[in-house]
């Protein structure tokens, strides 16, 4: 797999937006408080259109008189290997040179530290549905992402190929379908919340209640 050669560029380069499902999944799996790993970011005026086009759910809170929209991302911390940049707080990084004889080629290794409960956006990248929402396709970050010129921020060690994904096609489609559903659900939830916003302190209880009652029984 291509990601076995990766140094975690996407985990440093992008904000990792999470849904209500991701929040609850990470919190319950790792038994940690939401505040430990969630960064609630204000969406700046100039970012708003892009954020909305990317189907990111955004929320208003009465704490600031509903003046701003907020998005929920994983917290970032200073990278151990590249101290001039930030990385997802869950990225595990080490330098292979520490394990190899001196003089061997420098090799940075980075792996997701919460692989089993990583956010859906991470689990599906770089596969997406097309605009019709029916056909998955693989974007090629190696070719398409702008080169930044920083070793910690470059994406993918080589071109992405169909063969990289073929053995996992069924599980990828299943995971992508769930992701697509969750994206729509969390956006609908945001619209509902924003129609009657409450203080931030009430948000996580609200999310837990909604998610534990996602399947309703029809009333006769
Ligand atoms: S959760 Fe894992 S895969 Fe996602 S950005 Fe963080 S380290 Fe990378
Ligand atoms: S998609 Fe590319 S940059 Fe992201 S983890 Fe995989 S190989 Fe690395």
Image (cartoon, rainbow, N blue to C red):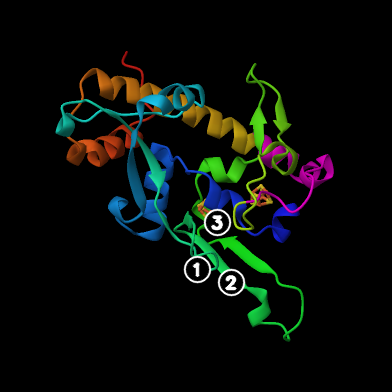
Task: Determine whether label 2 and label 1 are within 8 Å by CB.
Answer: yes
Rendered residue at 40%/28% (across/down): 57
Q: Quick one: label 2 or label 3, which is nearer the N terminus?
A: 2
Question: Relative to 12, is 67 above or below?
Answer: above
Which mark is on residue 115? 3
Which residue is painted at 70% across and 50% down in the image? Answer: 156
Label 3 near ligand 1 (CB < 8 Å): yes
Q: Which mark is residue 94?
A: 2
Among numbered discs 3 and 1, the one appearing first in the sequence: 1
Q: Is residue 64 left or right of residue 71?
A: left
The label nearer to you, 3 versus 1, is: 1
Image point (15%, 27%), residue name = 65
Circle 3 SS class: helix
Which residue does the numbered mark 1 point to in the structure image?
A: 80
Instruction: Say what secondary structure mark 2 lies in.
Output: strand
Question: For this rendering, which residue is in front, 48 or 179?
Answer: 48
For the record, the magenta segment spans: 154-173
Q: Give the spatial CA distance, label 3 vs label 1.
A: 19 Å
Of badges 2 and 3, the one in the foreground is 2
Q: Judge: label 2 CB < 8 Å from ligand 1.
A: no
The outermost residue toward the top is 220
- Residue 68's quadrant in the figure? top left
Of badges 2 and 1, nearer the viewer stands 1
Work out whether residue 153 or residue 127 is closer to the camera in this orientation and state it.
Answer: 153
In the rendering, at what x and y percent does residue 149 appear?
65, 51
Cα distance in 3D space between marks 2 and 1: 8 Å
């Amino acid at each position: 797999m291509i990601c076995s050669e990766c140094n975690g560029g996407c985990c440093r380069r992008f904000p990792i937006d999470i849904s209500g499902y991701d929040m609850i999944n990470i919190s319950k799996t790792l038994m940690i408080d939401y505040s430990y790993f969630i960064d609630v970011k204000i969406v700046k005026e100039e970012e708003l259109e892009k954020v909305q086009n990317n189907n990111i759910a955004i929320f208003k809170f009465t704490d600031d008189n509903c003046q701003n929209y907020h998005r929920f991302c994983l917290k970032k911390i200073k990278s151990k290997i590249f101290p001039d940049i930030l990385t997802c707080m869950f990225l595990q990084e080490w330098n292979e040179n520490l394990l190899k004889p001196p003089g061997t080629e420098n090799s940075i290794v980075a792996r997701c530290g919460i692989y089993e409960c990583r956010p859906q956006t991470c689990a599906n990248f770089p596969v997406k549905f097309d605009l019709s929402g029916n056909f998955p396709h693989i974007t090629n970050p190696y070719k398409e992402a702008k080169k930044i010129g920083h070793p910690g921020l470059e994406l993918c060690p080589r071109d992405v190929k169909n063969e990289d994904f073929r053995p996992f096609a069924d599980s990828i489609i299943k995971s992508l379908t769930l992701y697509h559903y969750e994206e729509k659900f969390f956006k609908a939830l945001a619209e509902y919340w924003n129609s009657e916003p409450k203080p931030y302190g009430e948000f996580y209880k609200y999310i837990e209640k909604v998610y534990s009652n996602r399947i309703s029984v029809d009333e006769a």
